Image (cartoon, rainbow, N blue to C red):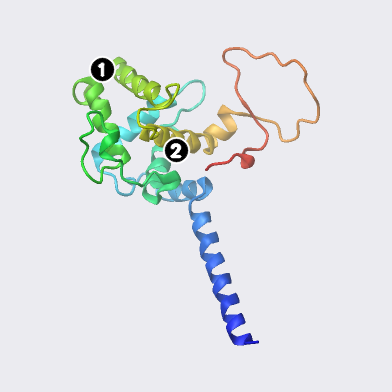
Amino acid sequence: MDHGNRDGRGAGRRQFLMVLAAAGAALTPAALWAQARSGAGAAPPGLMPSQRALLDRVCDLTIPDSDTPGALAAGVPAFVALALAHGLDGAGAPVPATRFTGGAGPDGATVLDWLRFELDLKTGGAFLTAAPAAQVQALAALDGAAYAPGGPPGGDPSPWRVLKGLIVTGYYTSEAGASRELQYELVPGHWDADVPVGPHARAWSSDWTAVDFG
């Protein structure tokens, strides 16, 4: 038996597993939030000012301020920008031309390129300069098409589903989303058979670490 080769293979496996572990840790929401906080106030990586403005506005419309801070106030755009840069949940993959309305998108388009194109089209001009009501209507139409019963034409999921997933993940793993928007009870300890729920009742979180983030 060649112990030298066996040990070499063992070392190789250990190194490989260490690389996988490091890569996985780098793509967790907690790691992205740590990186986002360390660069607070700086421009998100890889984004032009117009892309940053678009991401800010879309995050704000997706989860606006209420009696708790919304996505923009919670710093979610910086989280999403880092998630895009790292390709979290496949967000870094180019958007196929067929996903653009009319099927004539540019090669190598990003999720934000696609988003700007679709929202500009739905507002009949520049989305960012459209009236707030028109912006809400455009984003609602995009969201409705992305989650329509039966799925989108062609079977490919809308890029909006990926981006919205990042916004929601970023918000509910932020301080504001996890501890102020959600109610938290570490150990419930009893069974409530009938819990009154009103239109403004908040969701409960007792173990957010059990959530599958993809």
Q: Quadrant of residue 98?
A: top left
Q: Residue at x 28, y 17 (%)?
A: 134
Determine crowd level at label 1: few under 14, some 14-19, many 20+ residues with C-alpha closer than 10 A. Answer: few
Q: Quadrant of residue 140?
A: top left
In this view, the mark in front (1 or 2) = 2
Q: Percent from the top left, x then y, of residue 99?
A: 30, 34
Quarter of the image that includes the N terminus: bottom right
What is the number of the mark on residue 192?
none
Which residue is outermost to the left? 125
Find disc 1 in the rendering and name its residue. 131
Whether residue 75 is visible here, answered yes or no, is no
**Mark 1 or 2, nearer chain start:** 1
Q: Residue at x 22, y 44 (%)?
A: 107
Q: What is the C-alpha distance between the residues marked 1 and 2? A: 26 Å
Find disc 2 in the rendering and name its residue. 166
Q: Residue at x 60, y 17 (%)?
A: 201
